[in-house]
Image: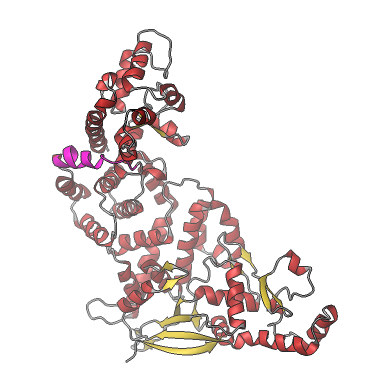
Protein backbone atom coordinates (compact mmCIF):
# COMPACT_ATOMS: atom_id res chain seq x y z
CA UNK A 1 0.00 0.00 0.00
CA UNK A 2 1.32 3.45 -0.93
CA UNK A 3 2.38 5.75 1.89
CA UNK A 4 0.74 8.67 0.14
CA UNK A 5 -1.50 9.77 -2.72
CA UNK A 6 -0.87 12.76 -4.96
CA UNK A 7 -3.90 14.63 -6.25
CA UNK A 8 -4.75 18.04 -7.57
CA UNK A 9 -7.40 20.34 -6.20
CA UNK A 10 -8.49 23.90 -6.84
CA UNK A 11 -7.98 27.01 -4.76
CA UNK A 12 -11.75 27.34 -4.41
CA UNK A 13 -12.15 23.75 -3.18
CA UNK A 14 -9.37 24.04 -0.62
CA UNK A 15 -10.79 27.28 0.80
CA UNK A 16 -14.20 25.58 0.99
CA UNK A 17 -12.73 22.62 2.86
CA UNK A 18 -11.09 24.93 5.36
CA UNK A 19 -14.38 26.78 5.94
CA UNK A 20 -16.20 23.49 6.42
CA UNK A 21 -13.47 22.19 8.77
CA UNK A 22 -12.69 19.19 6.60
CA UNK A 23 -9.01 20.05 6.93
CA UNK A 24 -7.74 21.39 10.24
CA UNK A 25 -5.13 24.12 10.09
CA UNK A 26 -3.19 23.63 13.31
CA UNK A 27 -1.46 27.00 13.16
CA UNK A 28 -4.56 29.10 12.37
CA UNK A 29 -4.53 30.98 15.68
CA UNK A 30 -0.78 31.57 15.57
CA UNK A 31 0.69 34.64 13.90
CA UNK A 32 0.78 34.75 10.12
CA UNK A 33 4.49 35.08 9.41
CA UNK A 34 4.49 35.90 5.71
CA UNK A 35 4.81 39.54 4.82
CA UNK A 36 2.30 40.99 2.37
CA UNK A 37 4.78 40.93 -0.52
CA UNK A 38 4.89 37.12 -0.37
CA UNK A 39 1.09 37.04 -0.63
CA UNK A 40 1.35 39.31 -3.66
CA UNK A 41 3.91 37.00 -5.28
CA UNK A 42 1.72 33.96 -4.62
CA UNK A 43 -1.24 35.61 -6.36
CA UNK A 44 0.99 36.58 -9.28
CA UNK A 45 2.19 32.97 -9.66
CA UNK A 46 -1.39 31.67 -9.66
CA UNK A 47 -2.43 34.31 -12.20
CA UNK A 48 0.40 33.23 -14.49
CA UNK A 49 -0.49 29.58 -13.93
CA UNK A 50 2.87 28.80 -12.33
CA UNK A 51 3.15 25.88 -9.86
CA UNK A 52 3.01 26.98 -6.22
CA UNK A 53 4.04 23.77 -4.50
CA UNK A 54 2.12 21.07 -2.69
CA UNK A 55 0.17 21.08 0.52
CA UNK A 56 0.56 17.99 2.65
CA UNK A 57 -2.15 16.48 4.84
CA UNK A 58 -2.34 13.45 7.09
CA UNK A 59 -5.35 11.84 8.65
CA UNK A 60 -5.11 10.65 12.23
CA UNK A 61 -4.63 6.92 12.61
CA UNK A 62 -7.74 4.83 13.17
CA UNK A 63 -8.54 4.74 16.88
CA UNK A 64 -10.76 2.22 18.61
CA UNK A 65 -13.61 3.79 20.52
CA UNK A 66 -15.04 2.27 23.69
CA UNK A 67 -17.99 0.83 21.79
CA UNK A 68 -15.61 -0.95 19.43
CA UNK A 69 -16.18 1.33 16.44
CA UNK A 70 -13.39 3.04 14.51
CA UNK A 71 -12.88 6.79 14.71
CA UNK A 72 -11.61 8.66 11.65
CA UNK A 73 -10.11 11.96 12.72
CA UNK A 74 -9.72 15.21 10.85
CA UNK A 75 -6.99 15.64 8.31
CA UNK A 76 -4.06 17.60 9.69
CA UNK A 77 -2.42 20.11 7.42
CA UNK A 78 1.25 19.49 8.15
CA UNK A 79 2.67 21.71 5.44
CA UNK A 80 1.18 24.59 3.48
CA UNK A 81 -0.58 26.55 6.20
CA UNK A 82 1.02 29.86 5.24
CA UNK A 83 0.01 29.48 1.58
CA UNK A 84 -3.57 28.55 2.44
CA UNK A 85 -3.87 31.39 4.94
CA UNK A 86 -2.46 33.77 2.32
CA UNK A 87 -5.00 32.58 -0.27
CA UNK A 88 -7.87 32.87 2.16
CA UNK A 89 -6.82 36.36 3.22
CA UNK A 90 -6.33 37.67 -0.32
CA UNK A 91 -9.36 36.07 -1.97
CA UNK A 92 -11.99 36.18 0.78
CA UNK A 93 -10.74 39.29 2.60
CA UNK A 94 -10.58 37.48 5.94
CA UNK A 95 -8.32 38.97 8.59
CA UNK A 96 -5.09 37.32 9.73
CA UNK A 97 -3.35 37.59 13.11
CA UNK A 98 0.05 39.31 13.00
CA UNK A 99 3.07 38.77 15.26
CA UNK A 100 1.57 41.09 17.89
CA UNK A 101 -1.72 39.16 17.84
CA UNK A 102 -3.46 42.04 16.14
CA UNK A 103 -5.97 41.23 13.43
CA UNK A 104 -5.31 42.84 10.09
CA UNK A 105 -6.37 42.57 6.46
CA UNK A 106 -3.91 41.83 3.71
CA UNK A 107 -5.11 43.77 0.71
CA UNK A 108 -3.65 42.84 -2.66
CA UNK A 109 -4.20 45.27 -5.52
CA UNK A 110 -4.28 44.46 -9.25
CA UNK A 111 -3.59 46.65 -12.28
CA UNK A 112 -5.57 45.19 -15.23
CA UNK A 113 -3.78 47.36 -17.78
CA UNK A 114 -0.30 46.21 -16.76
CA UNK A 115 -1.55 42.86 -15.38
CA UNK A 116 0.47 43.49 -12.25
CA UNK A 117 -0.15 42.74 -8.57
CA UNK A 118 0.98 44.93 -5.67
CA UNK A 119 0.37 45.32 -1.94
CA UNK A 120 -2.23 48.04 -1.53
CA UNK A 121 -0.83 51.39 -0.38
CA UNK A 122 -2.10 55.00 -0.23
CA UNK A 123 -0.79 55.80 -3.72
CA UNK A 124 -2.65 52.84 -5.22
CA UNK A 125 -5.87 53.88 -3.49
CA UNK A 126 -5.67 57.22 -5.35
CA UNK A 127 -4.85 55.66 -8.72
CA UNK A 128 -7.88 54.73 -10.86
CA UNK A 129 -5.85 52.16 -12.83
CA UNK A 130 -5.68 49.84 -9.83
CA UNK A 131 -8.27 47.51 -8.34
CA UNK A 132 -7.32 48.22 -4.70
CA UNK A 133 -8.51 44.90 -3.25
CA UNK A 134 -8.92 41.77 -5.37
CA UNK A 135 -11.14 40.23 -2.66
CA UNK A 136 -13.93 42.42 -4.05
CA UNK A 137 -13.61 40.70 -7.43
CA UNK A 138 -14.04 37.28 -5.81
CA UNK A 139 -17.04 38.32 -3.71
CA UNK A 140 -20.25 36.34 -4.46
CA UNK A 141 -22.17 39.53 -5.31
CA UNK A 142 -19.52 40.93 -7.66
CA UNK A 143 -21.13 42.49 -10.79
CA UNK A 144 -18.50 42.20 -13.53
CA UNK A 145 -20.59 44.01 -16.18
CA UNK A 146 -21.03 47.16 -14.10
CA UNK A 147 -17.47 46.99 -12.85
CA UNK A 148 -16.00 46.80 -16.38
CA UNK A 149 -18.06 49.75 -17.60
CA UNK A 150 -17.12 51.85 -14.59
CA UNK A 151 -13.42 50.98 -14.86
CA UNK A 152 -13.24 51.71 -18.60
CA UNK A 153 -14.99 55.05 -18.14
CA UNK A 154 -12.23 56.02 -15.72
CA UNK A 155 -9.43 54.45 -17.76
CA UNK A 156 -9.89 55.01 -21.49
CA UNK A 157 -6.65 53.25 -22.47
CA UNK A 158 -8.30 49.81 -22.14
CA UNK A 159 -11.38 48.59 -24.00
CA UNK A 160 -14.27 46.80 -22.27
CA UNK A 161 -13.47 43.68 -24.29
CA UNK A 162 -9.82 43.61 -23.20
CA UNK A 163 -10.81 44.45 -19.65
CA UNK A 164 -13.23 41.54 -19.61
CA UNK A 165 -10.51 39.13 -20.78
CA UNK A 166 -8.12 40.26 -18.05
CA UNK A 167 -10.83 40.17 -15.41
CA UNK A 168 -11.84 36.64 -16.38
CA UNK A 169 -8.20 35.55 -16.16
CA UNK A 170 -7.98 37.07 -12.69
CA UNK A 171 -11.15 35.31 -11.56
CA UNK A 172 -9.77 32.02 -12.87
CA UNK A 173 -7.31 32.05 -9.93
CA UNK A 174 -9.90 30.34 -7.77
CA UNK A 175 -9.90 27.44 -10.23
CA UNK A 176 -6.11 27.21 -10.27
CA UNK A 177 -4.69 23.80 -9.49
CA UNK A 178 -2.78 23.12 -6.28
CA UNK A 179 -1.13 19.78 -5.61
CA UNK A 180 -2.13 17.80 -2.54
CA UNK A 181 -0.07 15.04 -0.98
CA UNK A 182 -2.24 12.97 1.33
CA UNK A 183 -0.27 10.78 3.73
CA UNK A 184 -1.91 7.44 4.39
CA UNK A 185 -3.75 7.08 7.69
CA UNK A 186 -2.10 3.65 7.95
CA UNK A 187 1.34 5.21 8.47
CA UNK A 188 2.64 4.85 12.02
CA UNK A 189 3.33 7.90 14.13
CA UNK A 190 7.11 7.56 13.92
CA UNK A 191 7.07 7.61 10.12
CA UNK A 192 4.78 10.63 9.91
CA UNK A 193 6.86 12.43 12.54
CA UNK A 194 9.98 11.82 10.46
CA UNK A 195 8.22 13.09 7.32
CA UNK A 196 6.97 16.13 9.21
CA UNK A 197 10.40 17.03 10.58
CA UNK A 198 12.05 16.70 7.16
CA UNK A 199 9.65 19.12 5.51
CA UNK A 200 11.01 22.60 5.02
CA UNK A 201 8.57 25.42 5.58
CA UNK A 202 9.79 28.91 4.62
CA UNK A 203 13.34 27.72 5.18
CA UNK A 204 12.73 26.60 8.77
CA UNK A 205 12.94 22.91 9.55
CA UNK A 206 9.88 21.88 11.52
CA UNK A 207 10.38 20.15 14.84
CA UNK A 208 8.69 17.39 16.77
CA UNK A 209 7.24 20.07 19.02
CA UNK A 210 5.55 21.65 15.97
CA UNK A 211 4.03 18.31 15.11
CA UNK A 212 2.89 17.75 18.70
CA UNK A 213 1.25 21.18 18.71
CA UNK A 214 -0.55 20.26 15.50
CA UNK A 215 -1.83 17.08 17.10
CA UNK A 216 -3.05 19.03 20.11
CA UNK A 217 -4.88 21.62 18.03
CA UNK A 218 -6.99 19.28 15.91
CA UNK A 219 -8.53 17.35 18.81
CA UNK A 220 -11.53 19.45 19.82
CA UNK A 221 -13.09 16.58 21.81
CA UNK A 222 -10.44 16.84 24.53
CA UNK A 223 -9.99 20.63 24.49
CA UNK A 224 -6.98 20.53 22.20
CA UNK A 225 -7.50 24.05 20.80
CA UNK A 226 -7.80 25.45 24.34
CA UNK A 227 -4.59 23.71 25.42
CA UNK A 228 -2.86 24.97 22.29
CA UNK A 229 -3.93 28.56 22.79
CA UNK A 230 -2.99 28.46 26.48
CA UNK A 231 0.54 27.42 25.50
CA UNK A 232 0.85 29.88 22.63
CA UNK A 233 -0.58 32.92 24.34
CA UNK A 234 1.36 32.35 27.58
CA UNK A 235 4.66 32.07 25.72
CA UNK A 236 3.88 35.15 23.64
CA UNK A 237 2.85 37.28 26.62
CA UNK A 238 5.85 36.27 28.74
CA UNK A 239 7.96 38.10 26.14
CA UNK A 240 5.41 40.75 25.13
CA UNK A 241 3.10 41.48 28.09
CA UNK A 242 1.72 44.56 26.34
CA UNK A 243 0.05 42.36 23.69
CA UNK A 244 -2.42 41.08 26.27
CA UNK A 245 -5.14 43.49 25.13
CA UNK A 246 -4.75 42.42 21.48
CA UNK A 247 -5.24 38.78 22.42
CA UNK A 248 -8.21 39.61 24.63
CA UNK A 249 -9.87 41.71 21.92
CA UNK A 250 -9.12 39.43 18.97
CA UNK A 251 -9.96 36.09 20.55
CA UNK A 252 -13.01 36.75 22.67
CA UNK A 253 -13.93 33.07 22.72
CA UNK A 254 -10.69 32.07 24.41
CA UNK A 255 -10.71 35.19 26.59
CA UNK A 256 -13.89 33.88 28.22
CA UNK A 257 -12.29 30.55 29.21
CA UNK A 258 -10.88 29.59 32.59
CA UNK A 259 -7.50 28.95 30.94
CA UNK A 260 -7.24 32.57 29.85
CA UNK A 261 -7.99 33.73 33.39
CA UNK A 262 -5.07 31.59 34.56
CA UNK A 263 -2.56 33.35 32.28
CA UNK A 264 -3.82 36.91 32.77
CA UNK A 265 -1.20 37.51 35.46
CA UNK A 266 1.52 37.50 32.81
CA UNK A 267 0.39 40.91 31.49
CA UNK A 268 1.87 42.52 34.62
CA UNK A 269 5.02 40.38 34.72
CA UNK A 270 8.26 41.87 33.40
CA UNK A 271 11.05 39.49 34.44
CA UNK A 272 13.03 38.12 31.50
CA UNK A 273 15.21 35.46 33.17
CA UNK A 274 13.08 32.57 31.91
CA UNK A 275 11.12 33.21 28.71
CA UNK A 276 9.97 29.77 27.54
CA UNK A 277 8.97 29.12 23.95
CA UNK A 278 6.02 26.85 23.18
CA UNK A 279 8.57 24.09 22.62
CA UNK A 280 10.04 24.64 26.11
CA UNK A 281 6.62 24.67 27.77
CA UNK A 282 5.56 21.54 25.94
CA UNK A 283 8.77 19.73 26.89
CA UNK A 284 8.51 20.62 30.58
CA UNK A 285 4.80 19.73 30.86
CA UNK A 286 5.32 16.45 29.01
CA UNK A 287 8.43 15.33 30.92
CA UNK A 288 6.85 16.28 34.26
CA UNK A 289 3.52 14.49 33.74
CA UNK A 290 4.59 11.53 31.60
CA UNK A 291 8.16 10.96 32.92
CA UNK A 292 9.33 10.74 29.33
CA UNK A 293 11.76 12.83 27.32
CA UNK A 294 11.01 12.20 23.65
CA UNK A 295 8.40 14.55 22.21
CA UNK A 296 7.80 11.94 19.49
CA UNK A 297 6.32 9.79 22.27
CA UNK A 298 3.91 12.59 23.13
CA UNK A 299 2.68 12.59 19.53
CA UNK A 300 2.13 8.84 19.79
CA UNK A 301 0.27 9.13 23.10
CA UNK A 302 -1.95 11.95 21.85
CA UNK A 303 -2.82 9.67 18.93
CA UNK A 304 -3.76 6.90 21.36
CA UNK A 305 -0.88 4.55 20.82
CA UNK A 306 -0.53 1.57 23.14
CA UNK A 307 3.24 0.97 23.17
CA UNK A 308 2.77 -2.70 24.08
CA UNK A 309 0.12 -3.77 21.56
CA UNK A 310 0.99 -1.08 18.96
CA UNK A 311 -2.75 -0.38 18.64
CA UNK A 312 -4.44 2.99 18.87
CA UNK A 313 -7.01 3.33 21.65
CA UNK A 314 -9.34 6.19 22.46
CA UNK A 315 -8.88 5.82 26.21
CA UNK A 316 -5.15 6.54 25.77
CA UNK A 317 -5.99 9.67 23.76
CA UNK A 318 -8.32 10.83 26.52
CA UNK A 319 -5.90 10.18 29.39
CA UNK A 320 -2.97 11.70 27.48
CA UNK A 321 -4.84 14.94 26.79
CA UNK A 322 -5.97 15.09 30.42
CA UNK A 323 -2.40 14.65 31.73
CA UNK A 324 -1.00 17.14 29.24
CA UNK A 325 -3.56 19.75 30.23
CA UNK A 326 -2.67 19.24 33.89
CA UNK A 327 1.02 19.68 33.08
CA UNK A 328 0.40 22.86 31.09
CA UNK A 329 -1.73 24.38 33.86
CA UNK A 330 0.94 23.57 36.46
CA UNK A 331 3.56 25.21 34.23
CA UNK A 332 1.61 28.45 33.70
CA UNK A 333 0.46 28.64 37.34
CA UNK A 334 1.47 32.04 38.70
CA UNK A 335 2.72 30.76 42.06
CA UNK A 336 4.76 27.96 40.48
CA UNK A 337 6.34 30.10 37.80
CA UNK A 338 7.25 33.01 40.05
CA UNK A 339 8.62 30.76 42.74
CA UNK A 340 10.78 28.91 40.22
CA UNK A 341 12.17 32.19 38.87
CA UNK A 342 13.00 33.24 42.44
CA UNK A 343 14.96 29.99 42.86
CA UNK A 344 16.84 30.74 39.65
CA UNK A 345 17.65 34.25 40.87
CA UNK A 346 18.75 32.91 44.24
CA UNK A 347 21.46 30.95 42.38
CA UNK A 348 22.96 34.24 41.18
CA UNK A 349 21.23 34.22 37.80
CA UNK A 350 19.89 37.77 37.66
CA UNK A 351 19.99 38.15 33.87
CA UNK A 352 19.30 35.68 31.05
CA UNK A 353 22.82 36.32 29.75
CA UNK A 354 24.18 34.31 32.67
CA UNK A 355 22.50 31.11 31.59
CA UNK A 356 22.67 30.17 27.92
CA UNK A 357 21.30 26.67 28.41
CA UNK A 358 17.52 26.83 28.09
CA UNK A 359 17.53 23.06 28.50
CA UNK A 360 19.06 23.40 31.98
CA UNK A 361 16.28 25.81 32.96
CA UNK A 362 13.64 23.57 31.43
CA UNK A 363 14.75 20.53 33.39
CA UNK A 364 15.09 22.55 36.59
CA UNK A 365 11.46 23.66 36.24
CA UNK A 366 10.41 20.09 35.43
CA UNK A 367 12.15 18.95 38.62
CA UNK A 368 10.53 21.75 40.62
CA UNK A 369 7.05 20.68 39.49
CA UNK A 370 7.75 17.01 40.22
CA UNK A 371 9.04 17.71 43.72
CA UNK A 372 6.04 19.92 44.46
CA UNK A 373 3.73 17.13 43.35
CA UNK A 374 5.58 14.79 45.73
CA UNK A 375 4.96 17.26 48.60
CA UNK A 376 8.65 17.73 49.33
CA UNK A 377 9.32 20.47 51.88
CA UNK A 378 9.49 23.91 50.27
CA UNK A 379 12.96 24.83 51.49
CA UNK A 380 14.24 21.43 50.39
CA UNK A 381 12.77 21.98 46.91
CA UNK A 382 14.55 25.32 46.71
CA UNK A 383 17.90 23.77 47.64
CA UNK A 384 17.63 20.70 45.37
CA UNK A 385 16.45 22.65 42.31
CA UNK A 386 19.08 25.36 42.81
CA UNK A 387 21.92 22.83 43.12
CA UNK A 388 20.70 20.72 40.22
CA UNK A 389 20.45 23.78 37.99
CA UNK A 390 24.03 24.81 38.74
CA UNK A 391 25.24 21.20 38.44
CA UNK A 392 23.59 21.00 35.01
CA UNK A 393 25.46 24.10 33.87
CA UNK A 394 28.73 22.92 35.40
CA UNK A 395 28.62 19.59 33.58
CA UNK A 396 26.78 20.84 30.46
CA UNK A 397 24.41 17.98 31.20
CA UNK A 398 21.71 18.99 28.74
CA UNK A 399 23.80 20.32 25.90
CA UNK A 400 22.87 19.10 22.44
CA UNK A 401 19.83 16.83 22.32
CA UNK A 402 18.49 16.61 25.86
CA UNK A 403 15.64 14.14 25.45
CA UNK A 404 17.40 10.97 26.59
CA UNK A 405 19.01 12.65 29.59
CA UNK A 406 15.74 14.38 30.53
CA UNK A 407 13.98 11.02 30.69
CA UNK A 408 16.90 9.36 32.51
CA UNK A 409 17.04 12.03 35.22
CA UNK A 410 13.32 12.61 35.79
CA UNK A 411 12.65 8.89 36.23
CA UNK A 412 15.44 8.52 38.75
CA UNK A 413 14.30 11.54 40.73
CA UNK A 414 10.82 10.05 40.68
CA UNK A 415 11.98 6.64 41.93
CA UNK A 416 14.50 7.90 44.52
CA UNK A 417 13.54 7.58 48.20
CA UNK A 418 14.54 11.23 48.56
CA UNK A 419 15.69 13.69 45.89
CA UNK A 420 18.95 14.09 47.82
CA UNK A 421 19.87 10.47 47.15
CA UNK A 422 19.90 10.89 43.40
CA UNK A 423 21.53 14.32 43.61
CA UNK A 424 24.31 12.94 45.83
CA UNK A 425 24.93 9.99 43.51
CA UNK A 426 25.34 12.31 40.50
CA UNK A 427 27.60 14.64 42.49
CA UNK A 428 29.81 11.71 43.45
CA UNK A 429 30.16 10.67 39.83
CA UNK A 430 30.36 14.05 38.11
CA UNK A 431 31.86 16.48 40.64
CA UNK A 432 34.85 14.68 42.08
CA UNK A 433 38.02 16.43 43.27
CA UNK A 434 39.48 15.73 39.82
CA UNK A 435 36.64 17.75 38.28
CA UNK A 436 37.14 20.75 40.54
CA UNK A 437 40.93 20.73 40.47
CA UNK A 438 41.58 19.79 36.86
CA UNK A 439 38.59 19.67 34.51
CA UNK A 440 36.98 22.93 35.65
CA UNK A 441 40.35 24.72 35.65
CA UNK A 442 40.92 23.55 32.08
CA UNK A 443 37.43 24.68 31.08
CA UNK A 444 38.27 28.16 32.35
CA UNK A 445 41.06 28.32 29.78
CA UNK A 446 39.02 30.14 27.13
CA UNK A 447 38.45 33.59 25.68
CA UNK A 448 34.71 33.11 25.16
CA UNK A 449 32.97 35.47 27.58
CA UNK A 450 29.65 33.66 27.08
CA UNK A 451 31.31 30.49 28.40
CA UNK A 452 29.11 28.81 31.03
CA UNK A 453 32.18 28.59 33.27
CA UNK A 454 32.78 32.32 33.28
CA UNK A 455 29.06 32.79 33.89
CA UNK A 456 29.32 30.40 36.86
CA UNK A 457 32.09 32.54 38.30
CA UNK A 458 29.94 35.66 37.93
CA UNK A 459 26.98 33.81 39.49
CA UNK A 460 29.22 32.96 42.44
CA UNK A 461 30.14 36.63 42.80
CA UNK A 462 26.51 37.68 42.70
CA UNK A 463 25.59 35.00 45.22
CA UNK A 464 28.35 36.24 47.56
CA UNK A 465 27.38 39.89 47.00
CA UNK A 466 30.95 40.68 45.92
CA UNK A 467 32.13 44.18 45.16
CA UNK A 468 33.51 45.00 41.75
CA UNK A 469 37.29 44.96 41.38
CA UNK A 470 38.86 47.87 43.30
CA UNK A 471 35.41 49.16 44.30
CA UNK A 472 34.28 49.79 47.86
CA UNK A 473 30.53 50.14 47.42
CA UNK A 474 29.56 49.06 43.89
CA UNK A 475 28.79 45.34 43.60
CA UNK A 476 29.16 43.04 40.62
CA UNK A 477 25.38 42.71 40.73
CA UNK A 478 25.00 46.51 40.49
CA UNK A 479 27.17 46.64 37.38
CA UNK A 480 25.32 43.79 35.67
CA UNK A 481 21.94 45.34 36.42
CA UNK A 482 23.16 48.61 34.92
CA UNK A 483 24.57 46.77 31.90
CA UNK A 484 28.14 47.34 32.93
CA UNK A 485 30.90 45.44 31.20
CA UNK A 486 33.91 43.36 32.08
CA UNK A 487 37.40 44.81 31.80
CA UNK A 488 40.93 43.45 31.63
CA UNK A 489 43.09 43.02 34.74
CA UNK A 490 46.12 43.11 32.46
CA UNK A 491 44.98 45.97 30.17
CA UNK A 492 44.58 44.96 26.54
CA UNK A 493 46.61 47.87 25.18
CA UNK A 494 49.35 47.18 27.70
CA UNK A 495 49.61 43.55 26.55
CA UNK A 496 49.47 44.53 22.87
CA UNK A 497 52.31 47.06 23.13
CA UNK A 498 54.34 44.37 24.86
CA UNK A 499 53.94 41.86 22.05
CA UNK A 500 50.88 39.91 23.18
CA UNK A 501 48.64 40.57 20.16
CA UNK A 502 46.71 37.32 19.97
CA UNK A 503 43.06 38.13 20.66
CA UNK A 504 42.46 34.72 22.19
CA UNK A 505 45.30 35.35 24.59
CA UNK A 506 44.66 38.86 25.91
CA UNK A 507 40.91 38.20 26.07
CA UNK A 508 41.22 35.16 28.31
CA UNK A 509 38.31 35.05 30.77
CA UNK A 510 40.86 34.67 33.57
CA UNK A 511 41.95 38.20 32.61
CA UNK A 512 38.42 39.54 32.98
CA UNK A 513 36.80 41.16 35.96
CA UNK A 514 33.78 43.39 36.53
CA UNK A 515 35.09 46.91 37.15
CA UNK A 516 33.53 50.35 37.31
CA UNK A 517 34.12 52.40 34.18
CA UNK A 518 35.80 55.14 36.20
CA UNK A 519 38.27 52.60 37.66
CA UNK A 520 39.01 51.16 34.23
CA UNK A 521 39.68 54.65 32.82
CA UNK A 522 42.07 55.38 35.67
CA UNK A 523 44.00 52.16 35.05
CA UNK A 524 44.28 52.88 31.30
CA UNK A 525 47.15 50.84 29.82
CA UNK A 526 49.32 50.58 32.92
CA UNK A 527 51.08 47.41 34.00
CA UNK A 528 49.35 45.69 36.96
CA UNK A 529 52.39 46.31 39.17
CA UNK A 530 52.16 50.04 38.35
CA UNK A 531 48.46 50.63 38.97
CA UNK A 532 48.34 48.31 41.99
CA UNK A 533 51.18 50.32 43.54
CA UNK A 534 48.99 53.43 43.13
CA UNK A 535 46.12 51.69 44.91
CA UNK A 536 48.50 50.52 47.64
CA UNK A 537 49.57 54.12 48.27
CA UNK A 538 45.92 55.09 48.71
CA UNK A 539 45.69 52.61 51.58
CA UNK A 540 48.61 54.42 53.23
CA UNK A 541 46.84 57.77 53.30
CA UNK A 542 47.71 59.22 49.89
CA UNK A 543 45.10 60.79 47.59
CA UNK A 544 42.66 58.44 45.86
CA UNK A 545 43.53 57.95 42.20
CA UNK A 546 41.92 54.58 41.39
CA UNK A 547 38.66 53.67 43.09
CA UNK A 548 37.61 54.34 46.68
CA UNK A 549 39.53 51.72 48.67
CA UNK A 550 41.57 53.37 51.44
CA UNK A 551 42.42 50.55 53.85
CA UNK A 552 44.80 47.57 53.36
CA UNK A 553 42.27 45.06 54.72
CA UNK A 554 39.66 46.36 52.29
CA UNK A 555 42.04 45.94 49.38
CA UNK A 556 43.03 42.42 50.40
CA UNK A 557 39.39 41.39 50.80
CA UNK A 558 38.44 42.94 47.45
CA UNK A 559 41.17 41.05 45.64
CA UNK A 560 40.13 37.83 47.37
CA UNK A 561 36.46 38.14 46.39
CA UNK A 562 37.47 38.84 42.79
CA UNK A 563 39.93 35.92 42.78
CA UNK A 564 42.80 38.25 41.94
CA UNK A 565 46.08 36.86 43.33
CA UNK A 566 48.08 39.00 45.76
CA UNK A 567 51.05 38.52 43.43
CA UNK A 568 49.46 41.09 41.09
CA UNK A 569 51.39 43.85 42.93
CA UNK A 570 54.58 42.53 41.35
CA UNK A 571 53.42 41.37 37.90
CA UNK A 572 54.11 42.68 34.41
CA UNK A 573 53.62 41.23 30.93
CA UNK A 574 56.37 38.67 31.44
CA UNK A 575 54.32 37.04 34.20
CA UNK A 576 51.02 37.04 32.29
CA UNK A 577 50.85 33.26 31.69
CA UNK A 578 51.66 32.53 35.35
CA UNK A 579 48.91 34.94 36.39
CA UNK A 580 46.30 33.21 34.19
CA UNK A 581 47.17 29.81 35.64
CA UNK A 582 46.95 31.09 39.21
CA UNK A 583 43.70 32.96 38.68
CA UNK A 584 41.96 30.03 36.96
CA UNK A 585 42.63 27.93 40.03
CA UNK A 586 41.26 30.66 42.31
CA UNK A 587 38.15 31.03 40.12
CA UNK A 588 37.57 27.27 40.17
CA UNK A 589 37.88 27.23 43.97
CA UNK A 590 35.32 30.02 44.25
CA UNK A 591 32.87 28.22 41.97
CA UNK A 592 33.28 25.07 44.09
CA UNK A 593 32.59 26.93 47.34
CA UNK A 594 29.60 28.60 45.69
CA UNK A 595 28.15 25.25 44.65
CA UNK A 596 28.71 23.72 48.07
CA UNK A 597 26.90 26.64 49.76
CA UNK A 598 23.79 26.38 47.57
* Residue 69 in sight: yes
* Residue 566 in sight: no
Residue 255 in the magenta stretch? The answer is: no
**Residue 343 vs residue 203: left or right?**
left
Q: What residue is rendered at 45% in x and 28% in y?
A: 517
Q: Quadrant of the C terminus?
A: top left
Q: What residue is rendered at 59% in x and 72% in y?
A: 39
Eyeballing the image, is 169 above or below 126?
A: below
Q: What residue is rendered at 59% in x and 74% in y?
A: 41
Viewer-proximal residue, 514 or 66?
A: 514
Q: What residue is rendered at 57% in x and 68% in y?
A: 253
| Picture mark count | 0
Eyeballing the image, is 160 above or below 469?
A: below
Q: Quadrant of the N terminus?
A: bottom left
> Magenta stretch?
434-448
Instruction: Name the spot of residue 396 as percent of width and height, x first.
Output: 26, 50
Instruction: Name the spot of residue 289 as percent of width and height, x first.
Output: 32, 62
Question: Which quadrant of the figure has residue 294?
Answer: bottom left
The residue most toward the right is: 153
Instruction: Name the spot of residue 469 as percent of width and height, x first.
Output: 36, 26
Amino acid sequence: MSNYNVNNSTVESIISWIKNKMIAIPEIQRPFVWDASKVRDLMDSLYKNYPVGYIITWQNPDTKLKDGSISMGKKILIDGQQRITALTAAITGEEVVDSNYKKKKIRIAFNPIEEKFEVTNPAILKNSRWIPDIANVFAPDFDSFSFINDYCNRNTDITPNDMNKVLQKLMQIKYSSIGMIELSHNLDIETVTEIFIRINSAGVVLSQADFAMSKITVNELYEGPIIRKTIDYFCHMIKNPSDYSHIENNDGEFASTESFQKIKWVKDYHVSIYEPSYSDLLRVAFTYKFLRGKIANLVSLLSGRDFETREYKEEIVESSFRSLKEGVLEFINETNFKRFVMIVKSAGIITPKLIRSKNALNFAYTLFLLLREKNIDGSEINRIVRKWLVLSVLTERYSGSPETMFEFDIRRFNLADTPDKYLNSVEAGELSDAYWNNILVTNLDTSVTSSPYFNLFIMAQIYDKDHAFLSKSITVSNLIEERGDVHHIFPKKYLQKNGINNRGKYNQIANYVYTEQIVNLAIKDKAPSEYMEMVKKQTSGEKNVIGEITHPAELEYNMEMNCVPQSLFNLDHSNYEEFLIERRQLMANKIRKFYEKL
